[in-house]
Image (cartoon, rainbow, N blue to C red):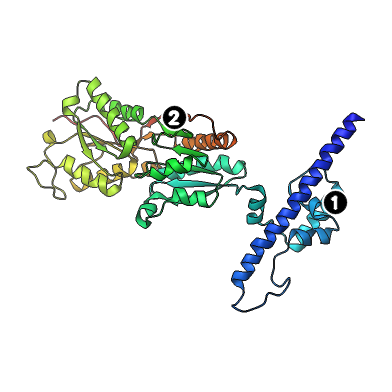
Amino acid sequence: MERSNGWLGTHAEGQVDAQAEGRAAERAEARTDGATAARAAPTGARPVAGAGRPPTIRGVAERAGVSKSLVSLVLQGSPRVSDSKRQAVLDAIEELGYRPNAAARSLVARRTHTVGVLLNDMRNPWFVEVLDGLNSLLQAHGLRMLMADGRLDRRAGQDFARTFQELRVDGLVVVGTLPDTDGLAEVAERLPTVIAGNHEPRLPHADLVANDDERGARLATEHLIGLGHRRIAHIAGQGLVGELRRRGFEAAMRAHGLAESAVVTSGDGTEEGGYRAAVRLLTPPSAPARPGARPPAAQRPTAVFAFNDISGVGALSAAQELGLRIPADLSLVGYDNTYLARIRHLWLNSVNNASHEVGRRAARCLLDRMACPDAPAGQQLVAPELEIRGSTAAPRPD
């Protein structure tokens, strides 16, 4: 008997909750639908009751001959509804074409089931696979992504991190290197936040998932050294990721006694930046760059390690314009292992930084952070691997 009363108590409590939610949902639907109708109505026009308005939870309840609270239970997938009542509600929903009002549900549940994703630059193909890994897990948990481009943020003078907070997203994922992170610390105090693909900023309650960039750079450099290259140049990137990859390059060169022959030139992570950097590297000061004018072999690097694949493609274009063949005259390694490296006529050796895995782990961290917002910040580094294709070979004898 006690067990029966306990179950009935739970059932009754669930009915009270469902009734309250049904009333709240109806009020929220009325507010959001009313606001939509008011915006759509011509100035001075009086709204006509029911005209052009979408079906509501009240209409579904009336068509099915049940209460609004029971409709709410069906929408929640509650097992405490008989099969006949559930079918009646589902039939009414189908007949009326009812779709739950997302804004209304957000007002009731105080959740939007959305995650803000702030990218450094959508033009970088590396982000595609990160987003794929991120979305695969978020979608499985009923969360949708809203994306913004940090590059556009800088141009428009907007702060998308705070904009996401105003949109009441349930969490935020920051992907890549952002030049200005002042507002991010403030947002991370109020919103579950994960940083993916970067090593900064370090915030008290923001998890970090990134590639082991220093290790990846060492892999690329040691591959070139293993082929016999001694004059190796690095086209460096920006931010802490760029610093870590440069550090890995220089550490590998020092370990093999090649520190004096290591050359580093700055880039900006773009194809144009890679092209310009390669022209500087491959053209000695005494010989101005001219298309088809091959620089003296004794004065140029025999191998180039680029900050990313995009820079590597720019370097490849510069080499070809200078009459150098890849890999016969110049070996080239990129980083990120994007689809660019896999294009057949490029076929670029590249460090695979497990971008899909970075995205998947970032999603897992965000879900955990949403469940425990005050947990200490964690850090995960994903191990890279070098993908060998056709852009490196042993150096030609001088």
Nearest the eye: 293 or 32: 32
Kindly identify which residue carries mark 1: 85
Secondary structure beneath dot 1 equals helix
Q: Quadrant of residue 199?
A: top left
Q: Nearer the viewer, mark 1 or mark 2?
A: 1
Kind of residue at badge 1: Lys
Looking at the image, residue 115 sits to the left or right of residue 350; the answer is right
Whole-Å distance between the Cαs marked 1 and 2? Answer: 51 Å
Give the crowd class for mark 2: few <14, some 14-19, many >=20 residues within 10 Å. Answer: some
Q: Reply above or below: 350 against 227.
A: below
| Quadrant including the N terminus | top right
Kindly identify which residue carries mark 2: 382
Q: Reply above or below: 312 against 247.
A: below
At which x and y percent is residue 52? 69, 71
The residue depicted at 69 percent of the width and 68 percent of the height is 53
Q: Quadrant of residue 308?
A: top left
At which x and y percent is residue 272? 26, 49
- Residue 88 seen in render: yes
| Quadrant including the C terminus | top left
Nearest the eye: 393 or 216: 216
Kind of residue at badge 2: Val
